[in-house]
Image (tube, rainbow, N blue to C red):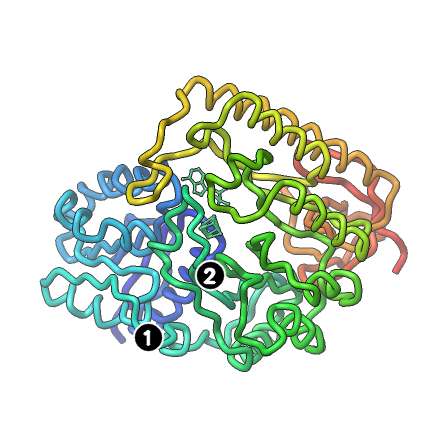
Amino acid sequence: MTEPKKLFIKTYGCQMNVYDSERMAEAMGGEGYVQTDTPDDADMILLNTCHIREKAAEKVYSELGRYKGLKAEKPDLKIGVAGCVAQAEGQEIMRRQPMVDLVVGPQSYHRLPELEAKARSGQKALDTDFPEDDKFTALKSRPKAKRGPTAFLTVQEGCDKFCAFCVVPYTRGAEVSRPATRIMDEARDLVDRGVRELTLLGQNVNAYHGHDKGLGGLIRELAKIDGLQRIRFTTSHPNDMDDDLIAAHGDCDKLMPYLHLPVQAGSDKILKRMNRAHTAEEYLKLIERLRSVRPDLHLSGDFIVGFPEETEADFQDTLDLIKAVEYGSAFSFKYSERPGTPAAERAQVPEDEKNDRLQRLQALLSQQQRALQDAMIGRDVSVLIEKAGREPGQMVGKSEYLHAVHVQAEGQAEGIAPGDMIPVRIVSSGRNSLNGDVLPR
Ligand code: 5AD
Ligand code: SF4
């Protein structure tokens, strides 16, 4: 028997890249590759990259630099770049790093086996097309291996919103929704293999239209699958939260009370210049509607500070909006100029100003996160156990609000395994997680 070839994949960026990497590993499994967790013994290295901010894109080139020695020692080693940097800078990568054998954009993964064969034959292989066919259908299906309790499932890709700062509409292309029947099949298969919680992914997931009743309709249908206990989705645009999706937060038990709903900024002037197509007040009204159907909803968001022409007063509007919402968690970034996007051409905010605003914004957000975590003390949650914790006997899982929760597996908790859903009383709050006691079941 011949030794299987080894594939090392390094994934950067968003959850969709995590999902794509899994699917690429499975597709290459069909070509005789097994995954390895170190580049040192790999026959093929694949970097699944992110182009959202400048720093993310630069990481790719420095990572490639590290593989020079390996490639010199092992001329048969094939190096590939996938993901959004591949899409945006494919030709340039080949020029800047001649050791790269293969470049594949996010919509061409189903062609990865062919591209690998081409690279093996000594040619350079590049594919950054946006083909009509659904890459997920063309990709070999997932093998029937057992899975952990949580999984991502991409339902929608691409974005038609064209926020003035964002490369996604260029790197991932126009919005495409996968048909509901295929998603249902994949979801059933994942549940059969042990998955209890699904996170539906899309760059603009709530613009999903592969079901005649939109994302809400898909969620209600998924909720009928026995054995599937929890459904989440990310990332949403405020303007695509339709009535049925809002209602689902109140009447669909399996839809978890946690919503990532980026607003980016709190000033109407900046929102307009960002091309977000809504005001701060409209966003706050939407949150109010969501909370009226689900009062305990935890909110998460994304924020950009130092967008071109943002003044101190505009920044204060962002702080005010954050104070009005009270986020359970949030991600915040300094504006990063992205080539080809409209905002890159405008007057930029000085770097030290951006640093200062980011610090103040993050101080407020962590204060809110901490306050909401502390407010959980004494409350009962249900925890879907994912794995063993760092300390002996400890298990870790997630609450319905997506807090990481640690429980001790002594006494009552003994015998608790990944995939179990257990009632827990929260007793204390740490930096980024909660600790709880297992309640009698
Ligand atoms: N600069 C800074 N942050 C950005 N994001 C997207 N593009 C940029 C950029 N050019 C952030 C937004 C988005 C998240 C995924 O990344 O907040 O919601
Ligand atoms: Fe980018 Fe999201 Fe705006 Fe689309 S909606 S352009 S993915 S920030």
Quadrant occupied by the N terminus: bottom left
Question: In screen coordinates, is 184 left or right of 373?
Answer: left
Q: Earlier in the sequence, mark 1 or mark 2?
A: 2
Residue assigned mark 1? 132
**Considering the numbered disc 1 on the image, is that residue within a helix, a strand or a loop?**
loop
Ligand 2 within 8 Å, label 1 CB:
no
Judge by depth and name the residue closer to the eye, 305 or 79.
Answer: 305
Q: Residue at x 80, y 35 (%)?
A: 428
Q: Residues within 10 Å of mark 2 (few under 14, many from 20)?
A: some
Q: Residue at x 72, y 67 (%)?
A: 229
**Measured along the vertical axis of the image, is residue 242 above or below residue 224?**
above
Tell me if residue 29 can be seen: yes
x, y (%) of residue 92?
Answer: 17, 47
x, y (%) of residue 436?
Answer: 80, 43
**Considering the numbered disc 2 on the image, is that residue within a helix, a strand or a loop?**
helix
Distance between the alpha carbons at the discs numbered 1 and 2? 21 Å
Label placed on residue 367: none
x, y (%) of residue 102?
Answer: 20, 58
